[in-house]
């Protein structure tokens, strides 16, 4: 509305929009992108979920339609060869992941357990792991699935038990936001929220 009421912005044009719900899922996001493009939109804003963005970003690039994501930060999405029409209004994970390693080093920590949601393993393998290796930081790497079922909760609990018994006291966490309630409950149940352990977290989209 503000854009349409300002005669200095997009003169001679009226800006309209259509809404589509991605449900935070890649297939739904792809279907929504297809439907919006079929309606004749000139571009798409969204989705904010890194794990839901890849397929619609490829589709929009194939169709020559710009897609602007306000919240996706995954390292996987930086390639302009694969996603030439994908734009992001938020910084990617690369810089913060390197900073995580440097800050840990500057605090005098020399080894850590790294706990990564499996959807963000690329960020770990391409950025965090090399950064830690370059600084001489030893680490144990554990990948887990989003704990949205009983089996996955049990798997995460087993991983946390391994960390509790590993002798490592620094825990680097690279999660999804939706993981955090279960992560908090399960880590407390394994004694990992006591003063003996220090957590540093990478927050992303």
Image: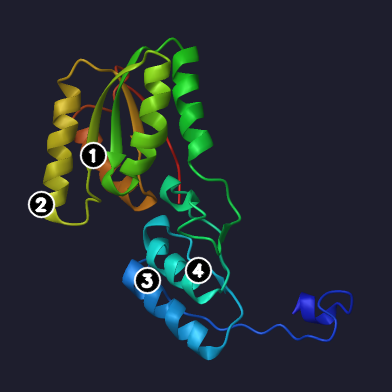
Identify the image quadrant of residue 82: bottom left
- What is the number of callouts on the image? 4
Counting residues from the start of the chain, the first of labels 4 and 3 encountered is 3
Q: Residue at x 50, y 68 (%)?
A: 61
| Mark 4 crowd level (few <14, some 14–19, many ≥20, 10 Å Cα) | some
Q: Residue at x 14, y 20 (%)?
A: 165
Q: Say which residue label 1 marks.
A: 143
Q: Nearer the viewer, residue 1 or 9?
A: 9
Secondary element under disc 1, as helix, strand or loop, is: strand
Q: Say which residue label 2 marks.
A: 151
**Going by the picture, which residue comes out furthest to the front?**
81
**Going by the picture, which residue comes out furthest to the bottom?**
39
In this image, 159 relative to 86: left or right?
A: left
Identify the image quadrant of residue 17: bottom right
Labelled disc at residue 23? 3
Residue 204 in the image: state x and y as whole percent: 45, 46
Secondary element under disc 3, as helix, strand or loop, is: loop
Q: Say which residue label 4 marks.
A: 61
Q: Work out how far the residue at label 1 is from the one at label 2, CA to CA, in angstroms.
A: 15 Å
């Amino acid at each position: 509305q503000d854009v349409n009421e300002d005669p200095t912005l997009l003169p001679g044009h009226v800006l309209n929009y259509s809404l589509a719900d991605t449900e935070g899922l890649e297939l739904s996001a792809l279907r929504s992108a297809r439907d919006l493009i079929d309606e004749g939109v000139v571009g798409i804003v969204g989705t904010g979920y890194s794990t839901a963005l890849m397929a619609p970003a490829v589709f929009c690039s194939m169709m020559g339609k710009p897609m602007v994501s306000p919240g996706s930060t995954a390292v996987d999405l930086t390639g302009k060869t694969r996603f030439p029409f994908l734009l992001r209004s938020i910084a990617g994970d690369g810089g913060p992941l390197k900073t995580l390693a440097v800050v840990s080093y500057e605090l005098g920590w020399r080894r850590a357990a790294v706990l990564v949601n499996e959807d963000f393993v690329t960020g770990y393998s391409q950025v965090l792991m090399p950064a830690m290796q370059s600084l001489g930081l030893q680490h144990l790497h554990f990948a887990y699935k989003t704990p949205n079922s009983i089996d996955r909760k049990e798997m995460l609990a087993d991983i946390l038990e391994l960390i509790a018994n590993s002798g490592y006291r620094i825990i680097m966490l690279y999660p999804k936001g939706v993981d955090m309630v279960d992560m908090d409950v399960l880590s407390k149940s394994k004694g990992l929220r006591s003063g003996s352990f220090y957590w540093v977290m990478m927050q992303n989209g």
